[in-house]
Amino acid sequence: MSTTQQGTHSLAFRVMRLCKPSFHVEPPFRLDPADLFVGEDIFDDPLAAANLPPLLSSQLTKSMDSSDLTYGNRFLLHHPSDAMGFSGLLLLPQSFGAIYLGETFCSYISINNNSNFEVRDIIIKAEIQTERQRILLLDTSKSPVESVRAGGRYDFIVEHDVKELGAHTLVCTALYNDNDGERKYLPQFFKFVVANPLSVRTKVRTVKETTYLEACIENHTKSNLYMDQVEFEPAPHWSATVLKADELHPADNSSTGGREIFKPPILIRSGGGIHNYLYQLKLASPDSAQMKVEGTNILGKLQITWRTNLGEPGRLQTQQILGTPISRKEIELQILEIPSLINLDKSFLVHLNLTNHTDRELGPFEVQLSQNSAHEEKKVMINGLQTMVLPQVEAFGSTDFHLSLIATKLGVQRISGITVSDTTEKKTYDPLPDVEIFVESD
């Protein structure tokens, strides 16, 4: 929509949006006369397939007689491609049309001299005005247009990457000398609205040390979108892997991962078509102190690029996607190795590791087996002193140690209740999860 301030002007702006043309469809669609008389499966019969087409063809030829002024054949198929309704012509945009976030707005602007005399020293400005900012697209202040003859025009093209939703105004202004030497100012406004082409819904789920991100992309436009790239850019200290159902091995999507030379685009159909993407996220190697800070829940963001039916590009970047806050344990105890052969009533060594995930020194520690119940007798016990003392562990450090155990019963048994306590802070941490072993006779 164009609006102009009141007053008589020799010049006027004309604006046309430059975008890919659309296919010109001629309704109504045409039909094959055979469909009016027989079903689709009639040609499954060899006899009908051999005799019916020539018969229908002869009748169709008679109906196409040029002397028939009733135009009774205007809805009939003359060629198989007629069923698509395409005339073979392309249609240029008749209006600004729908403009979507992430596209490049390109406009052909013509300033026309509608008077009978020449205008001179024309300074032209074009800018986009949004609710937040004004963006200058063209300014000829330093090199004004010398003149535009009577009935002539001056043309130019402006482009703008659309990064905001809502109302936009293309402001075109001209400062020029009229025939009588008067300096005149012409402002003209062209308003349009930017809509969201797609919506992205995410769901985050954490299983043990692995986080899964599901992204559902829905197409809100009236044309098909062909996804060139839907890539997750992980935050620092995260690595991302895209999971695909049709691949045996997931494709690495981290910053150091390889790129496919060619990936066929994924079609998301117009008017609500959707496609789901699944990413596996893992924290990088726990060598950096920074990544161990509690409360860091920024996972990363999605980079989305697409093309429409005729190749017009679009690009969007989501905001930072948040996961559940990372709450790492201060102390982590884990089993590194258990002997493969364990004999009854004979001691065996279990190799364990104690890691300090904090930025301060902790300890000394005591390691022991806790009792689940006062009446329950443990089948696997500590061999020797029931409490093992470990020295202090430095910040973000770890220590390995061996615990001597002994099994008192044959068969499948559980090593349970291995607990660590900080003797300085008088704090007991959660016991190690139970581990099953098989005890044999000597």
Image: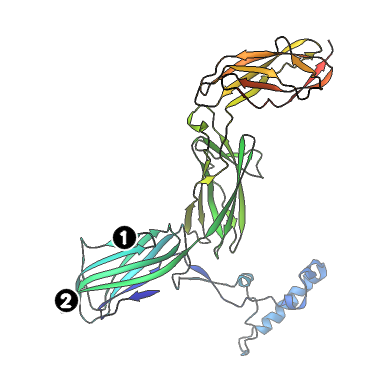
Q: Quadrant of residue 225?
A: bottom right
Q: Secondary structure at mark 1?
A: strand
| Vertical arrangement, residue 138 with respect to residue 369, above or below | below
Q: Percent position (x, y) of residue 320?
A: 50, 46
Q: Percent position (x, y) of residue 27?
A: 59, 77
Left or right of 114: which side holds 314? right
Would you name the residue on which mark 1 appears?
136
Sequence order check, earlier mark of 2 and 1:
1
Would you name the residue on which mark 2 appears?
182
Q: Residue at x 50, y 24 (%)?
A: 360
Q: Amino acid at mark 2?
A: Glu
Q: Amino acid at mark 1?
A: Leu
Q: Nearer the viewer, residue 360 or 106?
A: 360
| Vertical arrangement, residue 403 with respect to residue 316, above or below | above
**10 Å crowding of disc 2: few (<14), some (14-19), many (20+):** few
Q: Percent position (x, y) of residue 436?
A: 76, 24
Question: What is the C-alpha distance between the residues marked 2 and 1?
Answer: 26 Å
Q: Quadrant of residue 134?
A: bottom left
Question: What colouring method underlies this structural image?
Answer: rainbow
In the rendered view of the protein, which quadrant contains the C terminus?
top right
| Vertical arrangement, residue 75 with respect to residue 418, above or below | below
Q: Residue at x 35, y 75 (%)?
A: 3
Left or right of 336: which side holds 93? left
| Vertical arrangement, residue 269 with respect to residue 147, above or below | above
Give the numbered dot on residue 326.
none
